[in-house]
Every structure is written in C-alpha cells, then in structure tokens.
Amino acid sequence: MTRIPSKAEILDWISAHPTQTSKRDIAKAFGIKGADRIDLKRLLKELEAEGHLQKRHKTYRDPEQLPPVTVLLVKAPDENGDLYAQPLEWHGEGIEPIVLVVTTPAGPALGQGDRILARLSKVEGVEADHHYEARIIRRIGVNPKRVIGIFRKGAEGGRIVPIEKSSSNEWIVLEDAMQGARDGELVEAEQAGPKGRMGLPRARVINRLGDPSAPKAVSLIAIHQHGIPDDFPNAVVAEADAAKPMGLKGRKDLRDMPLITIDPADARDHDDACYAEADTDPNNPGGHIIWVAIADVAAYVKTGGELDREARKRGNSSYFPDRVVPMLPDRLSGDLCSLHEGVPRPCLAVRMQIDAEGNKISHHFVRGLMRSAASLHYAEVQAAMDGQVTDRTERFLEPVIKPLYAAYGALKKARARREPLDLDLPERKIVLSDSGQVTSVAFRDRLDAHKLIEEFMILANVSAAETLIKKRSPLLFRVHEEPAPEKLESLRETAMAAGFPLAKGQVLQTRHLNTLLNSAAGTDDAELINISTLRSMQQAYYTPENFGHFGLALRNYAHFTSPIRRYADLIVHRSLISAHGWGDDGLQPSEIDRLEETATHISETERRSMIAERDTTDRYLAAYLSERVGSEFTGRISGIARFGAFVKMDETGADGLVPVRTIGREFFHFDAEGGTLMGADTGLIISIGQRVTVRLTQAAPVTGGLELELLSLGDKALPKGDYSGGRGGGTRRSPAGRNVKRKSNKSKHKAAKVKRKVERKRKT
C-alpha cells in the first residue's frame, strides 16, 4: 500500500509549485495510484474545509501565496526583538502568512506601523515559525536624497565630494555615519538630517563602493556622467505608494487562461505574457491563436501626474550589468505592474489569429485581468522542448510550451517570406561577482525561446499599430529608415574588397543585404560584413509620422509590449484605451498636442541610455583585462582613423586602439574613403576586416580605454625592427643600420589605390 502524505507535505508541495494544481498532479508527485486516490481526495477536502486550499475547476490553489514583491505593515518587535510584518496585498481566505523582516545594519531603522516595500522568499521546512522572509527594498513614505561621491576623511568625520558635475555642494558626514569609509573611496550616501556646519547638508554613508576605478563603481559613474535620473522625487514615490491592486471591474477575466512569462533568469520585472493554442476554426486548418498580454501600466500612471512626468522625463529604463535604473518606482515596476506568477494583474491583451503559413488573419484587443501561470526563463523553456524536463516545466510542456513553439513555427515561415534584416552579432554577457568584479565575459546564447518571444512581440506591436491606424487614433511609431546613400556606398566598397558583391542601381531592400550576409556566412569575413552592415544602418527613432521599419521589413510598427520600461509603449497603451473607449485614462488632448516633442525627447533619452550602457561595458571590460596586460590576443580590424586602427578582440568582443605612432617608423597615409592606412615607405596596408594578432599594452578602467600593439596582420608577422615600438612620422632604421629619410610619396599611394581597385575587379 502506498504511503499517503501528510497534510503538511501536501501543502509544502503545492507551495513549491505555486500555480494551479490538479488532484492528478498531486497524486503523481507522491506516487499515489488506484484506490489510494480516495484517501488523497479525503485529505484535499479536509484541507479545503480548513481554509488551507481553494478548489476551482478541478484544481487546487494555495491561497497563502504572496507576490515576490509586496507592501508590508511592520508590527511591534516580539520578545526576542524580531520584526514581523503583515502583508497588505493578500488574496487568500485561509491562515494569514507570517512574514519575518530581515534587517541589516545599513538598512533603515523600522518601527511599528512603518510600511515597507520588500522582496519575499519562501521559507522551506516545517520547523520554521514563519512562512516568508522579507528583505527591504525601501521604507515607503521615506525617500531621502542620495549622492554619489568621493569620501574625504577629516578630523571629526569627513565630507563627500559629489562626482556629478552639476553639484557644487559638498556633504558633511559625522563620525557615526561614516560606516567605515576610507579617504578616497567612492561612496553612496543619503541625506541624514538638516543642514550642518556652513549650511552644508549632512549625509550618512549607506554603501562603500571602494576604489572609484573599481568595477562596482563603474555603472554609478556612467549614470551620473550622462545625467540619467536615478533618484525618484518624494512626490513620485508617494504617488506610487498610494497605488492599490486593480480588480475585475470593467475588464475581461483572463485569470483561467494559462498565460506564462518567459524572461531572462535574472529578470526583476515581467511585463509580457503569452499563450497559444491550435485554432479550432474549420476555415483555418493548421492555424493558431496567439494571446499576448501586457501589463496595464496606464491604469496606474495617469497623464499629468507625478509618475507620468517622471516617466516621461526618464523616457526609458537603463540596464547595466549590476543594476537597473527603472523608469517607474519599485512599487510599480517590481510589484503592481509586474506579471508575477500566481498573482492577479491588470493587462491589455491582444488575441491574434494566424494561418498555417504564419499570416495574421485577424486580431482584437481587450482590457483584462490575468494571473500568470508560471514565470519561466528562456533556458528552462528551451531545455524542456529539447527533452530536459524539470518538475517546474513538466506540467506546462504539453498544454502551454509546445503550442507556443508550434505557433512560432508558423511565424517563422512568414518571417522567411518577409526577410527582415538578419544580422548575426552575438551579444556579450558580463558576469559579476557579489563584490562587482568581472568573473567572466561570454556571448549570450540565441535560443529558439528568445526568437519565439521576439516574433510574438513583433506581431503584437504590428497589431497595435494597425488598430490605431484603422481607428485614426494618434500614436508614436517606431521608425527605422533605410541606409543613407553615402553609408550604403561605404558598405558596398567594404563588401567588394572582401570579394562579396552588393548590387547597385536598384531600390534597396533587406533581402539584398541578407544575400550579402548569407554569402559571407561561414567565412573569415562574416563578422566584418555583419559589423559593416550594422554601421550602415540608420538609428531607429520615435515619431507620430509613419515611415515604416526598414530593418524589420514592416510597413506599420509601434512599440506596445514594454510599458514598464519604455514611455513610447505607454503612449500606445493610452491611445488603445481611448480608441476602444475603455476609460478616462486614455490619451489626453494635451499629450496629442505635444506628441512630436515627446517623440524627440524619448528618442534622445534612449540614445543617452545606450551610450551610458556602452561606456559601462567598456569600463568593465577594461577592468577585466587590466590583469592581462602583456597578453596576446587575436582579433579583427574593426575601424580605421587617422590616429590608428581599432581592433575587436575575439575572446571578449572588446575594442582596443592600435595607435598609428606604434606601427613602425614611417608615415602612414589615411584613406577615409577606402578605410585604410598605408605605409609611405613599405606600402604596408591596414584595412577594415583584416585578421590580426595584438598585444595588450594598457588598460584603463576609469576611461574604458584599451591600447594595443600590432604584432601581425593575417599570417604575416610584422618584423620588430621595422614595425614595433616606433613612432609614425619619424625616421626608420634600416636592417643595415642606416637612417633612411621618411618619404611622402603620394604617387606611390595613388598607385597602390589603383592596384587595389584592379584587384577588386579581378576578384569579381
């Protein structure tokens, strides 16, 4: 006879699988078969009667499950001095969970009645006297001003000199607020009271970041250097804290639909969920129904409010290897607007019908209330499809994951016919230790799970644009124009030099560029052609005018799927709300009047974030490589300038500079049109795309700069006597020891240029 589990074991198992759970799933988990199922049924009914479980549609749910991020009310300390808190957002009807607040010396001093925003973790084991542990994100209603700066120790404490250029005031730090900070360290501090001596504000150190050039400080420096707002004003925080969970009123109930989120494993917020199933319409054989549900941020961020003004000011969230600077406060971005597993959340959802070939037949939008069935990450979803099923993914494989991939299979056919630009540029992933040190630099895998979500989001974005165009409702389009003629000509020359033709005299389409990319695929020039193609592209931007999206080969495109992190998506959501008459929180006349201004502003904030993120990556890579100065690396020439050649190194993807002054003792002619440097005496030609071996001679983490020494071009090693360690533009020592005067032979340079053109024609 099979052993029947105890009630506690059943509850523990359901808590570990915080989604809908059928009696069959529970029986399978404990190996219960045959007549023993009667005893299991009895236990489940008793648990239901006791309020520990809720039964709905033949499944059991744990009503004590709390969201991963939630607001808590702090209770009075117990006899041991421990702090417990009451969850303010709780949807169960059974026993209220007990939450222990985990405090740290650097955290805020809490007392009875304080409200805190906290991240929760479930406590495993039946011996614990509490169900959750809460780690404080911040105390609600308290939003002290913060500063990043260099700590300067004094006789009775010290001062903080802000690194922000616009801040001229120093901050006074009393001795008991130093937290052990040392002279010269970069610190993060918060205001600690009224102004002190000489009218300077007082501060308390809350985080010692160490050496200003150390990796942990890198992103903070970039944030302040580029003027990215990283503190929310009190009024913004207060408005976010006052927000309450949304109910079903005025919404379509989608809570029984097994929508799931698929994100990176370390994702802090979840703003999109999806579900797919085979279409039962007999007129659409082999077709699919795809649902994409997006967090309804517009329900919380109202036009003209404090949250709205701050979100527009930021334009978007900024992502760094060690932190996120969000567009919205944690109460929204990590809590009420995040589609956490098992928690009711408001959404805007689109139902899309596609045929067996991936063509969209129809679509319509609803304003709903959903409950995510699971928060999965890309790798585990892909592993499940590849046969590596876990307890977490097993119950979703057949009813949810496989139908998603089936629908994606159809969308791939439509994508192949559309032929969007198909660049192959691996994305770098910088892995940091807890102290902020770079432990490794690798390239992210591009799984089918990533591509699946991308295709679903693109289809939803197209649907949003088409709906608003049809309803004549104002919106912001995501526009990507075709390459400028001069950039296209530069790409054509690079391609021809590498032996790959790019036809001239025709209207450029993405399929022409894809033909070039496919021709280069698998060759030594593949990376060169991909980088050169990317550089020829215009930068995408936002505008109320529809100029199409060249890169995606789409006529109508708008951003709809990420309103937690992009203001443009929030505008599109509001326009959809107005167009469907869903409420008074839609697009307002005042917003319509300044759409052009908003489009320009958020396009600029997007570029600002991209530059700050790139600078941060460069600094992290320089810090990582600083311990390998003197090592040799392989790479490829990725750029040519008058002052030297840029090399992208294979191992890390980092870019370094080979100064022209170090490439031998001769003058180098710079050909901007051809993208080359040519030695006046030797005729040595350095051009984009050449394979090289270099030695790292200098790494500067503060600036992110890498300086390299050129050792070989292709298979040709550069003789040290002629090319190593000299200064371009001086004299050159010949092998015989004679001083040979540098020649400035322009005719020789022109002859070499003609020779290169002849060689290109011969190859083609």
Image (cartoon, rainbow, N blue to C red):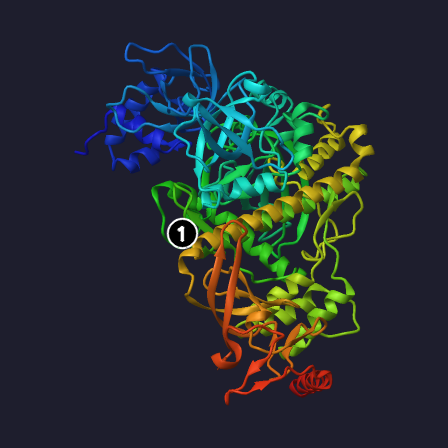
Identify the residue shown where x is 76% and y is 66%: 486
Q: Report the residue that reaches farthest toward the bottom.
A: 736
Q: Residue 300 versus residue 305: which sits nearer the camera?
A: 305
Point out the image quarter for the C terminus: bottom right
Q: Please, what secondary structure does the residue beneath circle 1 have? A: helix
Q: What crowding class fits label 1: few (fewer than 14 Cα within 10 Å), some (14-19), or many (20 or more)? A: some
Q: Answer with left or right where residue 690 lies relative to residue 364.
A: left
Q: Answer with left or right where residue 687 lies relative to residue 128.
A: right
Identify the residue shown where x is 42% and y is 10%: 112
Identify the residue shown where x is 70% and y is 54%: 539
Q: Residue 433 versus residue 570: which sits nearer the camera?
A: 433
Location of residue 132 in the rendering, given as x and y in whole percent from the top left corner: 36, 24
Q: With respect to residue 654, does 4 lie above or below?
A: above
Q: Residue 627 versus residue 3: which sits nearer the camera?
A: 627
Q: Answer with left or right where residue 415 lies relative to residue 583.
A: left
Query: Disc 1 marks which residue?
Result: 383
Q: Answer with left or right where residue 6 lies relative to residue 571.
A: left
Point out the image quarter for the N terminus: top left
